Image (spheres, rainbow, N blue to C red):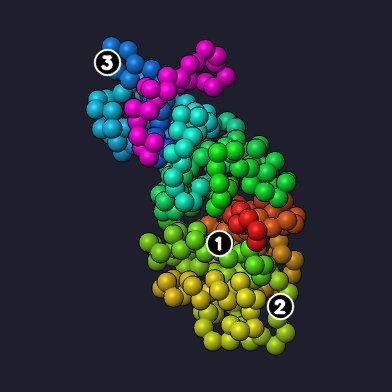
Amino acid sequence: MYPEWSPALSGLTIDIEIARRLPPGVAFRHLAIPIAEEGGRVTVFMADPYNQVGVAEVAAALGHQPYLVRTNPVFISDLLLTVWPDEISASLRLLVATPTEGATARFLAYSQRLGNLLNSQIIYIPLDEAAAGLALTTPPIPARTTLPIALLLVQQPRWPLRHILLILQGEPSESALLAWVLRLARPAGTVVTLLLLSPPLIGQPWSRSQVMSGGERKLPAPVQHLARQLTQAGISTELCLRQGSPEAQIRQETAAAEVDLALIINQPDTLLNRITPWFDRPLLIIAAAKGV
């Protein structure tokens, strides 16, 4: 068992020089930060000190085995953003909504796997802040981060990623999904389904699960672009058109296709607020690029 530090406790002072002994890549990847040194041994706050791979990498970077203390990932994220304000170099940034009662090892492992696939910077934020961001139709973005950015809501972690669902409304902003889904689907041979929620197209002969090929000219341009880019990348891509309300369509397709992860653009409407209370799979909410 490792000792634990509660962020509610007072009296913690971070020595920036000591904190920066751990390279930012290692620190952010394993949510670890050196906070003190005594007798030549460094005390390190770590979200998951039971992660042997992470501990080994931290020890190698420091040059010796540290004294590990377990604490909240949100708290460590805040400290790292303070210590390394200019070192958030990943092109994609992943905010992870973290339960107030704490993050389990399974939750942290899933978030880390997803972040590694995306080659993204992981920043843990409280679940209540994530909910507030959804109410404003914009993921909560810390002051020091820039787009592209996404918010991950994890209900039940599902791994490996065999099936990804893109929830589409035919909007231009949905082109921002491409950078994320390519990184997620390419390594594992994942099937990607494009669920188009806009009204069914008159006379369109698509069947459910039809692989995108000919006839796509009748689809909205953003959907055509996504389908073309995914198939050109060698990713198994399917189109789905369903009937009913958007919520009903998402429920039906999620259950029928055994979806492991869903992606959606954070549009300025109420769809996200309607589906997040009941959606029981990991959901990646992508912020649209500025100016789109």
What residue lies at 49% left-to-right and 51% top-to-bottom? 92
Q: Which residue is mark 2?
A: 200
> Mark 2 is on which residue type?
Pro
Over which residues does the magenta segment extend?
Answer: 1-26
What residue lies at 39% left-to-right and 36% top-to-bottom? 24
Instruction: Answer whether residue 292 is visible to the viewer in this image.
Output: yes
Left of 204 or right of it: where is 90? left
Judged from the image, the secondary structure of the residue bearing numbered disc 2 is loop
Image quarter where the C terminus lies is: bottom right
Give the camera-side residue of 242 and 128: 128
Q: Which residue is mark 1?
A: 177
> Mark 3 is on which residue type?
Gly
* Occupied quadrant, residue 248: bottom right
Foreground mark, 1 or 2?
A: 1
Q: Which mark is residue 40?
A: 3
Give the camera-side residue of 103 and 186: 186
Q: CA distance from mark 1 to mark 2?
A: 22 Å
Instruction: Answer whether residue 282 is visible to the viewer in this image.
Output: no
> Mark 1 is on which residue type?
Leu
